[in-house]
Amino acid sequence: MSLLEARGVTKELAVAGAPPARILDGVSLSVARGEFVAITGPSGSGKSTLLYLLGGLDHPTAGEILLDGRNLAAMDDEALTLLRNEAIGFVYQFHFLLPEFTALENVMMPILAGGRTTRKEAMARARDLLGEVGLADRLDHLPRQLSGGQQQRVSIARALANKPLLLCADEPTGNLDTANTERIVDLLLTLNRTMNQTVLVVTHEGSVADRAGREIRVVDGKVAS
Amino acid sequence: MAPRMLLGLAWRHLAGQRRQSLLTMAGVALGVMVLLVISALMNGLLVSFRDTIVEAAPHLVITGREGGTRTAPRMLLPEGLPGAVVQLADRGEPSGRTDIAHHPQVVEAVSRLDGLSVVSPYVATQVIGATAAETAPVFARGVTPALADRVVGLSRRIREGSWAAFAADPGTVALGREAAKTLDVGPGERLRLIASGGQVLDGRVAAVFATGIKALDEQAFIHLKVAQRLEELPPDHVTGLELRAQRLDQVDALRSTLEARTGLVVETWEQTNASIFTLFRIIGTITRMLVVFTILVAGFGVANVLVTVVLGKQKDISLLRSIGFTRDRILGLFLIEGLLLGLGGALAGALLGFVACTLMGYIPAGGDNEFGDQKTLVMAQDATTYAGTMVLALLVCLVASVGPARRAAGLAPVDVLRGETT
């Protein structure tokens, strides 16, 4: 049974003084629990937009997106926000860490936002996660005191904070050098294999896509393969 | 979500804009401080004036004439012509005499009422005062010295001569400082008082007093019987009765009772001075309004800082939204930031206001004036004004933060993220 399923997903964006631009056109796909899927495609193909829709950051213009049986397209903003907190983790090309908070606090943020655990438990969980991504000695560092690769690892730890069903990564290595790219991909693969973490990665790097279990290619707003 | 977390986020956002945040709080603090200082000054002036009135004026006055105490108009005097022929413009009595007849019985009846400490009958009369050097109109008040002293406490306000000397000799006059100055006369010197009907008192100044109330310091106090003779009143007729209450908060109730029992006109000290109290209130309201505008302007500063934070933190806001912060939480976050700015400004303003008020309390005030005889500025501070001003500042800041907060809450995370990815 698939964890994530998209049925005829279409996304149009309003353009001033012109007809809406169709970014995605009737995309259908499914991702099984524990899969590592790379979404690839040329620039402007709509792959990031597809990831945002699958991750519940945006509503499709038409179609259905089912995550663990729940239709994201039918949820209102608040329900979708709470679902993102509970079930979806995000990693972006730019780490998007809160600059005023330490690595530990950044990882604790989604746990505390969920309000389901105590601060002490959140801190223990964040500490464990940072240990798993190899940053046990950087807990109290501010983002500006970390390298690009370290910042991205903190953001991966943050994405895993609430044990999400789905980890969405948008060009997670797009801003890193080769060595760090390798480390991040290794980390994602390890998470996928050891924790059975379902991972969706948008990338235009062949080396990353090659290591994924499956590649979904998006061209001109449609799934090409 | 733990409010502590929102508070922590809000705090660090503001700390990230330290200079701007501090400047904004300084603006709020300045508004709060100025409002507190102005309020303390205005209230101090009012309290000082009120205390002087309460101390030196009767709490209640009973007259037989509708409209309150009789105040005779000034006479028209050619300036610089001492001893010149003068003309009475008006005796101030529209029709007939409105004095209180059989005053001993009225005094006895009134004295039986609980809550009154002194009842002092008086006769008011407008006379011409003449000395060797000057001639001028004087408002004279005939009293029983022992009783009048207990009402207005003049014996404690004697600057020259002696109240006892005045009390002991019906042929003497106790002059207010302003009247003594006008007539250029001092204790022991001769003073002739000429009534409009031609009756004359050839007296001597026994004492000069100063109360700080100009209207009182322009008067001459004479003995009741002398005033009755000058006014050609029968011995049991007086212009009115001056009363002192045991407690100020009973004055209004006493007024109603007295009016009902005597059928006479009774005026409280607040009614007598209603116009000046109203003036105080109007000036106070206008001044405070102006200062409230200062706080409103400070509110724009708060809005400005928050708009800057919202613009600078769009990525952070989008991230927070993507990890589970609902729109309401984002709204709450920025409202808290506005409140933090307001709270910081209000606390600093209250502290500065307290220090400023305390220091201003040492500034010399001139003393002995219309508004009391205090030697330094009276700064009346009270907790209610502090609390009210701080709440006002907080409300202004809260309202000012609504716009930026709504803007932040309305941000769609994907719009910002889409612009950030390649």
Image: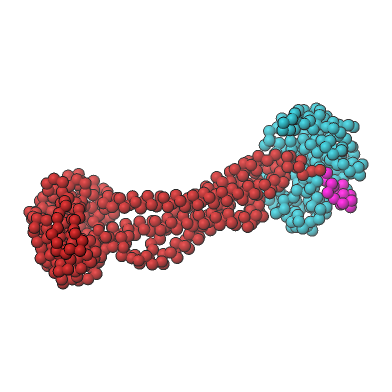
- Image coordinates of residue B217 in percent, x first then y, are 24, 62
Q: What residue sits 41% from the left and 50% below the top?
A: B286
**Where residue B196 appears, x then y in whole percent?**
11, 56
Residue in front for this viewpoint, B279 or A179: B279
Q: Position of residue B392 (x, y in %)?
A: 49, 49
**Chain in cyan colour:** A
Q: Is residue B364 above or below residue A195?
A: below
Count of labels in the image? 0
> Colour in which chain B is shown?
red
Quadrant of res A159: top right
Q: Nearer the viewer, residue A193 or B417?
A: B417
Image quarter hosting the N terminus of chain B: top right
Q: State left or right for residue B3 relative to residue A180.
A: left
The residue that appears at 32% across and 58% down in the rendered structure is B49
Residue at point 71%, 36% (across, down) = A80
Q: Position of residue B408 (x, y in %)?
A: 65, 43
Residue range of the region highlighted in magenta in the rendering: A171-185
Residue B45 lies in the magenta stretch: no
Front residue of this view, candidates B196 and B318: B196
* B110 horizontally vs A86: left or right: left
Q: Is residue A58 above or below residue B175?
A: above
> In this orientation, does residue B111 appear?
no
